[in-house]
Image (tube, rainbow, N blue to C red):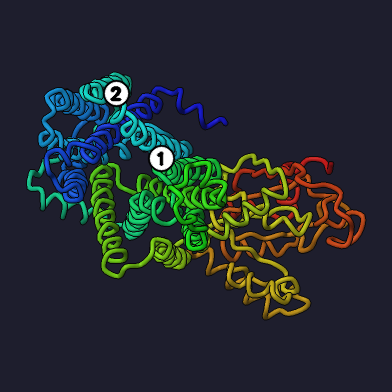
Amino acid sequence: MRQLSLLSCRRFGPFFVTQALGAMNDNVFRFALMFLLTFGVAQAKGWDIHLLMNLAAGLFILPFFLFSSLGGQLADRFDKAIFIRWIKGLELLIMLAALLGFWMQWWSFLVALVFVMGLQSALFGPVKYALLPQQLSRDELVFGNALVGMGTFVAILLGTLAGGLMAGWAEAAVYRIGLVCVGLSLLGLLASLLIPRGAVADPDLRLNLNLFSQIAESMRLARRHRGIWVAMLAVSWFWFMGSGYLTQFPTFARHVVYANETVATLLLALFTLGVGAGALLAGYWSRGRIELGLVPLGALGMAIFSSAFFYQGHHFPPLAEGDSLRSGAEFVAAGGVGLCLTLMLAGMSGGGFIVPLYSYVQRKAPGRSRARVIAAMNILNALAMVVSALTGLLLLSLLTLSLPLFYLVYGLTALVVFVASLFWVRDALLRFVVYLISHTLYRVRHQGLEQVPERGAALVVANHVSYMDALLLAGACHRPLRFVIDRDIHDLPLLNQVLQWCGTVPLSSEKVDRNDLNQAFAKVGEALARGELVFVFPEGRLTRDGEIQPFKRGIERLVARYPVPVIPMALSGLWGSWFSRQGGRAFLKWPRRFWSPVDIRVGAPIAPDAVSAADLQARVAALRGPVP
């Protein structure tokens, strides 16, 4: 895949390695310590293990509330590459202290170091995502985020597994865990030295050392832009959902599917790898753009698969009397394959959900305050994880819900997020669904899409070959297209409601209904006044012989009334398809091919005062080339 070449670029590869090693090291240290405390130390010292685990979790999360804003300020005030090296140097010092703690078996000291590790992670969080827009181009940002998301979750998984394994492997020589952590920190520091330096976002920023006013200022910066704030709340909901999922896996394995710790680890691995795979898939589907249409689909996927997880867990066969807990193989044989697949798909839905949201926040946040805005998001994420823990306590301990019902309740929150997102990104969702449909039916190749402006009104015209034309063009464009279509098609039963929801403009010819034509022109004018792209097929009907029919002069009248640029497009490869009129009426002949190649070519915008129907027809014909 071409985008994977980012990993070999100096402006991305060293950073990717640095952040992945940091995430892995965090989890090796924390989970090795947790396993050692759980399976020996706490009992030997008479400590309450439940209190100790909650204390350790709180000590790690608390710095995200207190110090994320400071990290955002420092990342905006200094060169981000240099700041990352400072943070990695701090990590190395912390791990050297951890090595001493493991060597001397100072368990209280090691628990206190969890707070310091949380501090280091809180400082790194804002610069981690603020650096990417500075180092990557607009077309690379989304896939860069996808790679970072994948790398982070895989590193968390590997660190979690390694921490648990090393707790058993180290035995009496627990200092070996410290040596591994020091080695990972040193590798991360060396990788950070290769991150290229860049411009300072706000060199005149005065640092505010008041922790609480820092938090308030970061939130104020984030709330200036409504879209950024909504995206941040959506990301925080994902961490609420993901934290709830991960926390309950050990108990789910033990008390719902009656399996041992191997199955608990398997569930953790599948969900985490699913998130990473979903992030990569989102990067691929986004095609270098921020594809917000993935957000409602990701939420819907999490709702569906959470409900399926509830159903499968609720109906999982119990153990026979006297049987021991199931092993991994026994769990699979008892019907665990479907449950594992469901969990993997839930994770993939989550990965697809967060990648466009992170990219949106990064791109929309002002460059001078980007790190502080991301710091606010990290604070909200930490708060969401705390709320998730309290929700789990309420549902499972106070209301005594079963664990399958717990996952169903979380799935219902995903359904609420799905419905809410429809109001925020409806057009993006429609465009993305159209893209998936059209690119499943055809191998679509694009040329010249950069000619479509990022914003501002324009008319788009193209040749009309088949009934799939509108779907292909809408799926190809990165902006919503408002189509002007023939009223006879618009008013077809069932299709009418869908087209109205999509905002299409029905049009009758002047000979049929002059008033209807004027109303259509007025609606087009309203759309253009809002800065939208309006699409027109100037031929007025499907071609019957594959050749471009004469363009109607109505396009000239439209541009004269609403002077905006006109963008010519051309479709080729559709003549002869099931949706065209070659060999008979569309849909009434046997399909002869599937996933055939289709080309969409875009020409340079034409100034409104230079538009003529004949010239547009010639330009579209030149873009299309000969009929294949």
Tell me how far mark 2 sits from mark 1, CA to CA: 20 Å
Q: Residue furthest right?
A: 583
**Horizontal and vertical percent for residue 534?**
59, 60
| Local secondary structure at mark 2 | helix
Q: Which mark is drawn over residue 325?
A: none
**577 and 150: which is toward the camera:** 150
Residue 565 in the figure: left or right of residue 418? right
Residue under label 2, please give it. Answer: 184
Residue type pointed to by label 2: Leu
Q: Residue furthest front?
A: 322
Q: Is residue 68 visible?
A: no
As displayed, is residue 405 above or below residue 27?
A: below
Residue 19 in the figure: left or right of residue 482? left
Residue 535 in the figure: left or right of residue 112? right
Residue at horizontal 73 percent and vertical 56 percent from the top:
468
**Horizontal and vertical percent for residue 209?**
8, 43
Residue at horizontal 30 percent and vertical 46 percent from the top:
366
**56 and 367: which is toward the camera:** 56
**239 and 609: which is toward the camera:** 239
As displayed, is residue 352 above or below residue 151?
A: below
Mark 2 touches mark 1? (CB < 8 Å): no
| Local secondary structure at mark 1 | helix
Residue mark closest to the camera, 2 vs 1:
2
Residue under label 1, please give it. Answer: 149
Residue at horizontal 55 percent and vertical 51 percent from the top:
334
Number of disc labels:
2
Residue type pointed to by label 1: Gly
**Horizontal and vertical percent for residue 13?**
40, 25
Q: Is residue 286 visible?
A: yes
**222 and 541: which is toward the camera:** 222
Q: Residues within 10 Å of mark 1 (few under 14, many from 20)?
A: many
